[in-house]
Amino acid sequence: MMTDTAPPTQPNDAEKTPRQRWMAVLARAGAEAIAARLRRAEAIPEWRRLRGPDTGLVMLRGRSGGGGASFNLGEMTVTRCTLRLASGLVGHATVAGRNLRHAELAALADALLQDPARQDALLADLIAPLAAAQQVQRQALAARAAATRVQFFALQTMRT
Amino acid sequence: MMLAPDLPGFADPVADAQATFRAVLDAMARPGTIHAVAPGLDAPAPLDPATAALLLTLVDPDTPLWVEPALAPARDWIAFHCGALLVAVPEAASFLLATVLPPLDTLRRGSDEAPEEGASVILQLSALGEGTRFRLDGPGLAAPASFAAAGLGAGFVAAWHANRAGFPRGVDLLLGCDTRIAALPRSVAVDQI
């Protein structure tokens, strides 16, 4: 991900709140991975679905040249879920694709993570390993892409 | 930051909204007839299930909604489940949610070219099918029909005469009580019995 070309409305990684960070990790993780790690968490309270999980389309917007005028890039299938724990905490999730279970588990994890009594344990047992696995995956992909990188010297010279 | 209501919306959003929409069509086509909606909808206080179902079915981000201050405790639920654009003044709204009928002559009435831009008032009543008796006549009614409701207010018949005088411009009225709805479209003539 090239953070230097992101539009100013998109916070870069350092500006994200802790909640934004764990929501991003949960959205990228698989349903099975979240379920397996939540199973180890103790005494998950009852929850009630407020909305969804349901699948729909969102319009993705891009910016020409990374920072110019915005345009509609295309539509993407997403699944969202909002649920409320018996304690009153509300978890939200929006994940790519049509996996209803993934959206519900991500929303459940989001709600549990907002509980100060559980947050540290969950960040260590759930979010950290998932984030590490995603980082490894990203690096592997970047390494594969880097091997085929082509430098367009002529174009670069013309632009500068 | 997203709002967090305490209660869910329709259990089956597509089927329940379609069934409620069908009931609204029937109620508008046959003014004064009473239709059941919202089986099992857990409505947020102080809304009745019928008015909550009308909101879920009709209101979305394209329809500015004005909510009577007395119904403000339900605002979070409405904003979350309808995605409604909540406006501060009744004049700017295409839907109004109220328990006391707002002055109809201050609301959007549409224009002769676009009468569909007239506002719709979703009115939560204390009783439907009993209370003050009215005689209805107009399109959709083969013969004058009688209709009863409590909570429309003392000046309702006069206000409705004025509303009907500007046809095709005007305001439509959707009535909800408990789990039942009825409608008074702008085309119907109302007289007190």
Image (cartoon, coloured by chain):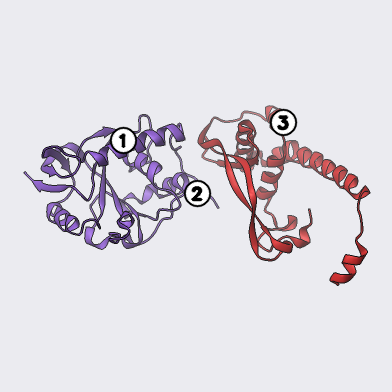
Chain colours: A red, B purple
The residue under the point 53% across, 36% down is: A52
Badge 2 density bin: few <14, some 14–19, many ≥20, Cα 10 Å: few
Residues tagged 3 and 1 counted as in contact (Cβ below 8 A): no
Q: Is residue A50 above or below residue A156?
A: above
Q: Percent position (x, y) of residue A5?
A: 76, 62
Element type where label 3 sits in the image: helix
How many numbered tags mark residues here?
3
> What label sits on residue B23 in the rendered view?
1
The residue under the point 68% across, 32% down is: A31
| Nearer-the-camera pick, A134 or B173 | B173
Q: Where is residue A97, by image quadrant?
A: top right
User: Is any part of residue B168 visible from this angle?
Assistant: yes
Q: Mark 2 against mark 1, which lies toward the viewer?
A: 1
User: Is any part of residue B103 visible from this angle?
Assistant: no
> What label sits on residue B3 in the rendered view?
2
Alpha-carbon distance for marks 2 and 3? Answer: 28 Å
Amino acid at circle 2: Leu
Q: In this view, does B190 lie above or below B128?
A: below
Q: Percent position (x, y) of residue B176?
A: 27, 41
Amino acid at circle 3: Arg
Q: What chain letter is assigned to the residue under label 3?
A: A
Q: Mark 3 against mark 1, which lies toward the viewer?
A: 1
Amino acid at circle 1: Ala
Instruction: Give the mark, 2 or 1, whose residue is nearer the N terminus.
Output: 2
Element type where label 1 sits in the image: helix
Which residue is denoted by mark 3 in the rendering?
A37
Q: What chain letter is assigned to the residue under label 2?
A: B
Badge 1 density bin: few <14, some 14–19, many ≥20, Cα 10 Å: many
